[in-house]
Structure formats: C-alpha cells, structure tokens
Image: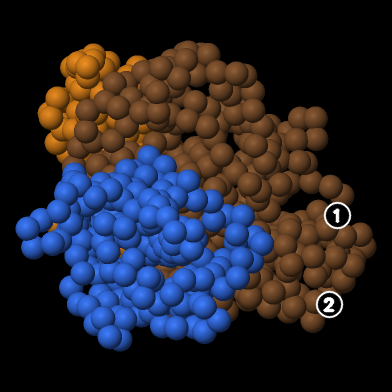
Chain colours: A orange, B blue, C brown
Amino acid sequence: MSDKVMVTTTVNGEEYEAMVEPRTLLVHMIRESLHLTGTHIGCDTTSCGACTVLLDGRPVKSCTILAVQANGRELMTVEGLEAADGLSPVQEGFKEEHGLHCGYCTPGMMMTVTALLEENPNPSEDEIRKAISGNLCRCTGYVNIIKAVHYAAKKKEGAAA
Amino acid sequence: MGIVIENDFDVAATPDDTYALMTDVERVAPCIPGATITGQREDGAYDALVTMKMGPMSLTYKGVIEIVEQDDAAKTAVMRAKATEAKGQGTAQATLTMNISDAGDGKTNVKVGSDILVTGRVAQMGRGIMTDVAGKMIGEMAKAMEATLVASAEAKARGEAPPESVAAEAPSAVGIAADITKGKIKGLFGGNKD
Amino acid sequence: MLPSTFDYVAPTTLDEAVQALAAGAGDAKIMAGGQSLLPMMKLRLASPGMIIDLNGIAGLDTLEESDGTLRIGALVRHADLENSDLVRDRYPIIHDAAQHVADPLIRNRGTFCGSLAHGDPAGDWATVATTLGAELHAVGPNGAVVHSAHDFQTSMFETQLGMDQILVEARIPAPKAGQGSAYLKIERKVGDYAAAAVGVMIVLDGTTITEASIGLTNVGPLTINATDAAASLVGKSIDDAAALEEAGRLAAEISEPSSDLRGPEEYKRDLVRVLTKRALRTAGLRAQGKEA
C-alpha cells in the first residue's frame, strides 16, 4: 500500500539516502532520518517558518513538502552554513548583532536571509522585512535580525572586495 | 451562542399538519442535507449521521437528534442535534427553534431559528467557512422542509398517506456562486415567500 | 500532525497523470505546490488515498506571452509571477496580488493554477482570474477541456474541474491598448486572508472608460464579480470622481461580508468601497502609462 520509498538528496553538499513513507514530511526526514536537527518544527499550520531550508537554493517550509518531493534535489540546512574557515557572514551577523534570544526561529530565519543575500546583496530594511515575513520570531521584535542582515551584507561585500 | 440563522416561509398546509410534521424527527431529519437516521433510542431520541463533503475535505458527524421542548398549544418546538465528528475533527451542536402559526388563506407560516456551534479545526479553517456551510445547509433544510410539507398536504388532499420526506441536496452539490452574481443570495436566508 | 497514509505517484508525462487520476476513482488528488493541500492533510481534514505529483512532468512551467495570450502553466509558482518583469509591466493586477499571496516561502512552492483548482473561497487568484477573464485549460481522459474563470468556482473548495481532470494552464488575454489593472488587499498580517480585497481592470480610450471589470475577494461566500459596479463606469471619465465613488458604492452594495475577527460587516463593506476607488485610480494611471 504505502511501502517505504528511497529518497536520495544532496544535503549541504553530501549525498544522503533515506527510506521513508510517502507521507513523511521533508522536515521529519531531515531531522529523523538524516539526524540534522538544526531545522526546527514550530507549528502545525505552515505558519512559523522555523523549518525553513533551501531547496535548490530557494527558501521553503520543509514541513509543507513531502520528503519524496525532494528526491534528486539539493538541500541546504543550517548545518551547511558554516564554512571551513568559520561562521558564514549571516551566522556572524546574528552573533554580533544579537539577532536571536531563544534561538528557535533562528535556523529558519538564517536560511531565508542567506537566500535573500544571494539574490539581493544589499537589501533595504523594507526588502528584508518582506523577505522574512514568512519567518515568525516571538522573542526579538525583528530589529536585531534586520541589523544582523545588514551586518552580513556588509561582511559579504567586504569579503568580495 | 454560535452561528445564528433565521428562516421564514409559508406553506399551503394547515398549522396542525405542519406542526405535526415539524415535531416528527423521523420525517424532518431527511431534510437536513447529508443526514440519515440510523436508529432510535429508548428515550425517543434518534441516532443520526450527517456527512458533508467540501472539495478534498469530508466530515462525518455522528450524533443524537431529539425534540427537547414542545408546546402543542402554541405550536412551538425546540429540536436539538448534538454530534461528534467521526475522525476526531471536533463537534457540532444545533438548536432549532420552530414557530408555527396560521398565516391565513389556508396557509401556515413557519419560522425556524437555528443556533449552530461548531468546534474543532474545521471551525477555525480558513475565513470561517463553517458559517457559510451552516448557512447553506440550513437554507437547503428549510427548502426541503417546505417541499415535504407541500407534498404531504397534497397527498392528504388526495386522501393518500404522507409521502417520503423530501431529502435536501447534500452541501457539495449546491452551487451558490451563481446566486451571488445574480444578487439572489438573500433568498438562501430570507425565506421562500413565493 | 502527519498526513494519513497514501499511495504516491510521480508521473513523468501528463498522460500518465491523467491515467493515474482516473485509476484513483475519486480518491486521488493532484499535487503541484501542495501549499494548500498539505496543510489540510497534516490536520487530517483531507485524507486522499493517492497523491499524484505533477512536479516531475516537463513543460508545465510555461510563463510566457504568445499569440495574444499570457500562458501560466500548472507549475508556475506564485514567486515566478511576483518576480516576472513581463507580468509586472503588462499584467500589474497579477503583480500586485502576488505580493499578498501567503508569504515568500509559500510563494516559492505554491502555484497559481493549483490555487485556482483548490478553490479556496477566500483566494486572491480567483478574483484575479475572474477580473481578467481567464480561460482555464484542463485535460481529462476524454482530452482537453476549457473552463471559463467566471463560472469555474462552484462552491467552497469545489470547482468545475471534474474529478478526472487536471488543470494544466491558465490563459489570460493580452492587455489591450489603454488597459490598466490593479489589486489592493487589506490583511491583518502577512499570510492572512483578506479582510477585503479588490481587483480591477479597465480599458481607456483617452480618458474615457470603455471596458471595466471588478472582482471582490473574501466579502462573500465566493469571489464576487461586481458587474453592476463595473458597468456603471463604461462611458465615464477616469477623472470623474463621482463615477468612481458610484462604482465603489455599488461594489460595496453587492458584497456580503461576514463579521469576524478581521472586522465587522460595515467595516469590510467600507473597505470594498474605498479599495475599489483606489484600485480604479491606480489602474487608470497605469492605463495612461503614468507612474501609479
């Protein structure tokens, strides 16, 4: 009936295989089959964005995608942000500008802004607010998150120079 | 108090016949869209099943319908239905207050006030679709009640036994879009005074 | 929560998808973006026995203007419409509405056609499709079927799409000379349904309105096509404030909003009145090639 199927994905540059039911959500495959627990589950209604990952470079809510739909695709999770030489500019920005309190929304938030900066290296505050409007934070009031993004943008610009 | 809907219609039948039909759960239940009576309890209440299908969603409410108040002299009655969704999608409770009076000219006026309370995820779904679903169902119920009364009165006039109650159209089959664009939406709730 | 179990089919051709749908005998659902269906399945409000995933079928992501028509394929995401220069320049009502559909993450997966097929009574795209007179092209076991956006939605979450049909493309007539359009939505927060939203399309000859179309979102059980309001504008000048006021009044009059947490009925009616006027003014500026 609904036997398990093999799902092959490239996550943070590494190939993974997992046997999952068709009804398994991508976020559950990431957390439980691939043991990448940085991606969080914060709601049951596709509202909060704590589960945000990059699917073929686009930020999506992994709780509202079936794992089987990611077969053959590329994923990046928060574990993939850190480079060999240290934190990514976005991670550093969140650290330096105190862009988190409890940290629950943070992985999803960082994935969204990482994708934003790839597409728009110097976003305005309005553009940042619009880009993160699918990621809810109950702690920070978003102000320091925006500062973190500006920090990261400057850091990336400096690194590119 | 939940969703409140008022229906008002006149039928070509006597107040006595109308009252008798409206307080007979077995004959009135089929007028509820998607309803089937599955049995009767010792205390006179009826077990019923009401199924609703809306696109990918389908709900099955299992519950009890009974007349809880009845004033034969005044021709008023209160019918209550209490149900639980079979797959754990919450509950539904409806209280129907019926007032039957002589409208003159051989007609009877029927007023049905419905108070509907729906709990569970489906009640929170979207923009509050349950209000619209309830409105639609009650509207169809009122139409079916009227049709049943008319058929019953006609059969009586011919000296025949009352026919089967008219079953209401199940919710998924009712198209209300056309009614809205033609501005006829009031007809669903305001009663059928032909 | 988890969806209940289902069979999963990932066809690589449209024919396979149509066959799978027929074999599903009413218990199968098509999935493109899944951003409306999966939330229902996760709450177990919907439990299809089979999911047929369109994402593996090539050629369903067409977004182009050809032969006097804008073609929006079944796999065109809300974000694709939001980011398209063609759409922004030639179909601004679509561009406007796209900003307000759900949130940016959902827009990366959800699809325009999927949204129409899902038939959410408060959906923004249904208003856009009605206002622009879209043609909805589907395929079934007996071949191609075309539905008009005007009659497409029949009830809550129900459309004219037969249980064995797949909506593969929406086609929108290319804008005429002097055409302008706009969509304005008031929502309490990002991702919410509209407290009220209005879509308009007008065609100007000089400053005279020769054609008009007005759609209202979430102020009635389904999208409302405000035909009287639109008809009242034909022959009037776009600069005629009284004509715009009258159109707003008629649109508010035909609406049937419910009082809820988004506001009382009177408030929503007034939103319709004001948003209609504002949308008409914006559409008018765009029709004249001016900055809106």
Which residue sits at x=81%, y=68%? C233
Does A63 sit above or below residue C229?
Answer: above
Q: Nearer the viewer, residue C111 or A141?
A: C111
Above or below A67: residue C152: below
Any part of residue C131 in sight: yes
| Position in image of residue A65 (x %, y %) | 32, 34
Tag 1: amino acid? Gly
The reply, left or right, for residue A151 in relation to residue B90 is: right
Percent position of residue B112, x then y: 38, 74
Q: Residue furthest left?
A: B42
Q: Is residue A112 visible?
A: no
The residue carrying mark 2 is C240
- Tell me the SS state at disc 1: loop
Mark 1 and 2 residues: CB-CB less than 8 Å, in contact? no
Q: How many marks?
A: 2
- Find residue C6 and report its image quarter: top left
> What residue lies at 54% left-to-right and 56% top-to-bottom?
B176
| B132, above or below A81, in the image | below
* Label 2 CA crowd tier, 10 Å (few <14, some 14–19, many 20+): few
Spot occupied by residue C23 in the image (x, y as percentages of width and height): 41, 17
Which quarter of the picture shows residue B129? bottom left
On residue C178, which mark appears? 1
Cα gap from disc 1 to disc 2, whole angstroms: 17 Å
Q: Quadrant of the N terminus of chain A?
A: top left
User: Which numbered marker is on residue C231?
Assistant: none
Q: Amino acid at mark 2?
A: Asp
Q: Nearer the viewer, residue B104 or C155?
A: B104
